[in-house]
Image: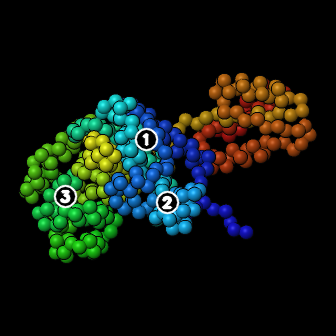
Amino acid sequence: MQAPRPMRGMRDVLPGEAGVRLHTLQVIREAYRQHGFFEIETPVVETMETLTSSGAGENEKLMFKVLKRGERLDAALAGTEDELADAALRFDLTVPLARFYSINQSKLPKPFYAMQLGPVFRAERPQRGRFRQFLQTDIDVLGDPSYLAEVQLLIAATSALHKIGLEGFEIRLNDRRILEFLLNKLEIPDDRFTGVMIALDKLDKQSVAEVVAELQAKGIAADQATHLVAVLGELSEASSLKALADLGVPKALIANLSAIQQHVTTSVRDVPVVFDPLIVRGIGYYTSTVYEIIHPKWSGSIGGGGRYDQLLARFGTDTPACGVSLGFERVVGLVEELGLMRETGARRLTVIFEPDHQTAEALSKARHFRREGYLVTLLAHQSGARSPMKRIALSAEELKAEGSVDSFYHFTVGVDEAPRLLIQ
């Protein structure tokens, strides 16, 4: 018999961890709400047409596709239709948001401050903090072309992280148009920009030699690739917007980044905002500003986003847009590793009763204790049977071992006058 297991890259969540996740999600949701964002929902399944028209780059290669159904599947299998799939599980929340806005914009305020919290799916290699099904917590501003949209997004995201209890993180900021300027100076063809940016986005994961080799595989000459990576490395070491002026980068681009840096720094506490030319974001729909949130206790980012002004135009709505997403699985991982969970433990109460004679009284007691704030479950126990206390205590201890911060009580109908503490 085959041993049961979840699909590779997906996992079960036990009650203790589920409590941490729920608390963290509630804190993020409330922080976003305090900054004026409206929560929406979109389906987990989108049409292939929607997802493949997004320009999302390599993420489109990681889709879990959904087969056609009924007669259309039969036709596809028979070869009379080209494709077997006509839909897929969403790989992010940004593309569904663009589709959502194109349909519903007449019913929404302008600019629209959107919040989405939900699962997404990517068929990528599982690793620490990265699963094939994971939760994204996104906020986006649609309809504001100014840098104030980015400022508000980053302030809201950092506020959520602070409310969770995370400290010591920083925001790294860049603008893809700066990179495009450098690519133009090196006479790299425009039609290769997207592929080059996807390769450069791997500089924090791969060696310089590996990235240069990938650039060459994309048709970039060896000397161009080496020089480009070297220039970015020098800018990264300088970590200053002033270094861009020496390269002839347009003043407007520098001023835009400088304004974001200044206003976010003065609006949030103890969060450095630094220029980092190696922040690229390997998703094709980003057009200008990009940013990532980095924590020293976690390799890779715990959040990121950018401006995607051209994405909505692909759905017939020429509207500027930008967003930020906190990597929920990574944030929860940090919360657990650093022991930051601040969930207030509930009082869980087991009401023990004899089912033949005490059911009505037990239900009445349960209603009473729920009004007093207990989380109540009923346990029928036949008179003369072995005491259930050992089993109740063992269950409570297992939940505590898995991270539960709840307190556990018991109450025996006809015996106790008030709930009795079992495990604090």
Residue receiving disc 3: 179
* Residue 324 shows up from this direction: no
* Residue at disc 3, secondary structure: helix
Residue 154: assigned label: none
Please name the amino acid that badge 2 sits on: Ala
Please name the amino acid that badge 3 sits on: Leu
Q: Residue at x 14, y 62 (%)?
A: 184
Which mark's residue is nearer the viewer, 3 or 2? 2
The 10 Å Cα crowd at callout 1, few under 14, some 14 to 19, many 20 or more, is many
| Display coloring | rainbow
Decide which of tag 1 and tag 2 comes sooner along the chain: 2
Quadrant of the rendering where the C terminus is positioned = top right
Q: Residue furthest front?
A: 80
Decide which of tag 3 and tag 2 comes sooner along the chain: 2
Coordinates of residue 61 in the picture (x, y in percent): 41, 63
Q: Residue furthest right?
A: 384
Residue receiving disc 2: 85
Q: Nearer the viewer, residue 78 or 272?
A: 78
Quadrant of the rendering where the N terminus is positioned = bottom right
Spatial distance from mark 1 to mark 2, Cα to Cα?
Answer: 26 Å
Q: Quadrant of residue 256?
A: top left
Q: Nearer the viewer, residue 40 or 397?
A: 40
Decide which of tag 1 and tag 3 comes sooner along the chain: 1
* Residue 227 shows up from this direction: yes
* Residue at disc 1, secondary structure: strand
Coordinates of residue 68 in the picture (x, y in percent): 53, 57
Coordinates of residue 354 in the picture (x, y in percent): 86, 34
Residue receiving disc 1: 116
Please name the amino acid that badge 1 sits on: Gln
Q: Is residue 86 left or right of residue 258?
A: right
The 10 Å Cα crowd at callout 3, few under 14, some 14 to 19, many 20 or more, is many
